[in-house]
Image (cartoon, grey):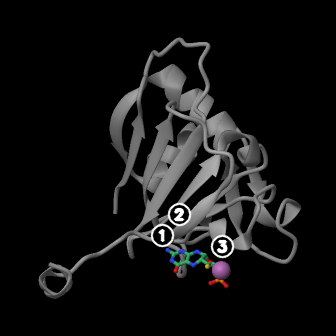
């Protein structure tokens, strides 16, 4: 399963877990940042810098937030300042994740544990208007039935 990475300046790339984790300069046991949870994780921000370098992007700008979306369409938008300790869990017992595959975000500095999005398949770095608070939840899914009813 691929993960789509998008950055307004750096462009778009489809990555495998292997490609992402091998690019990441800083790998840690997750329990160092999230006590009680086993597994190997890599740091988000140092991975992001390495990815931007690989994309040959030079910029002084920083994203204002990151948006991640999961297989089940759960998604979260998190201000850049809450992401300093953020990591992606990618392996448990030396194997791909049983729960949260392909990767799971953990946000130790985040405003809520609900931001620990499982099964992330899309990661977007955004530079637009600042968001002051993190948000999460399922994307709006409007069925044909509802459209008819609300007409
Ligand atoms: N993909 C996905 N990730 C998700 C959720 C979800 O519904 N889908 N729920 C979130 C919420 S609201 C919480 S509280 C935690 C629960 O994590 P747990 O399953 O490890 O207890 O996962 C978060 N990550
Ligand atoms: Mo939650």
Local SS, label 1? loop
User: In the rendered structure, are the residues bearing label 1 and label 2 in contact, judged by CB atoms less than 8 Å apart?
Assistant: yes
Residue 48 x %, y %: 58, 35
Residue 21, placed above or below residue 151: above
Ligand 2, what quadrant? bottom right
Image point 64% across, 68% down: which residue?
116
Mark 1 CB lies closer than 8 A to ligand 1: yes
Mark 3 CB lies closer than 8 A to ligand 2: yes
Judge the density around disc 2: few (<14), some (14-19), many (≥20) Cα neighbours within 10 Å: many
Determine if residue 89 is in view: no
For the residues labelled 1 and 3, the Cα–Cα distance comes to 13 Å
For the residues labelled 3 and 2, the Cα–Cα distance comes to 15 Å
Residue 100, placed above or below residue 67: below
Residue 37 x %, y %: 78, 75
**Residue that sits furthest to the front in the current view:** 151
Q: Earlier in the sequence, mark 1 or mark 2?
A: 2
Quarter-of-image position of residue 49: top right
Image point 40% across, 39% down: which residue?
6
Q: Earlier in the sequence, mark 3 or mark 2?
A: 2
Local SS, label 3? helix
Residue 57, placed above or below residue 42: above
Identify the residue position indicated by label 2 in the image: 103
Using the image, tell me which numbered label, if any, was put on residue 114. Answer: 3
Q: Earlier in the sequence, mark 1 or mark 3?
A: 3
Figure quadrant of the C terminus? bottom left
Q: Is residue 74 left or right of residue 11?
A: right
Residue 101 x %, y %: 48, 71
Count of numbered marks: 3
Q: Is residue 102 left or right of residue 113?
A: left
User: In the rendered structure, are the residues bearing label 1 and label 3 in contact, judged by CB atoms less than 8 Å apart?
Assistant: no
Figure quadrant of the N terminus? bottom left
Identify the residue position indicated by label 1 in the image: 119
């Amino acid at each position: 399963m691929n993960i789509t990475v998008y950055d307004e300046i750096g462009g778009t790339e489809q990555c495998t877990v292997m490609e992402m984790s091998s690019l990441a300069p800083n790998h840690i046991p997750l329990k160092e940042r999230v006590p009680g949870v086993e597994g190997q994780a890599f740091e988000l921000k140092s991975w992001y810098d390495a990815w931007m370098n690989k994309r040959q992007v030079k910029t002084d700008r920083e994203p204002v937030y990151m948006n991640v979306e999961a297989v089940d369409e759960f998604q979260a938008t998190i201000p850049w300042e809450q992401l300093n300790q953020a990591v992606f869990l990618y392996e448990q017992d030396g194997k791909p994740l049983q729960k949260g595959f392909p990767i799971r975000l953990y946000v130790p500095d985040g405003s809520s544990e609900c931001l620990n999005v499982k099964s992330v398949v899309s990661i977007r770095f955004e530079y637009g208007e600042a968001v002051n608070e993190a948000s999460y939840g399922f994307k709006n899914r409007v069925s044909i039935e509802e459209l008819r009813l609300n007409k």
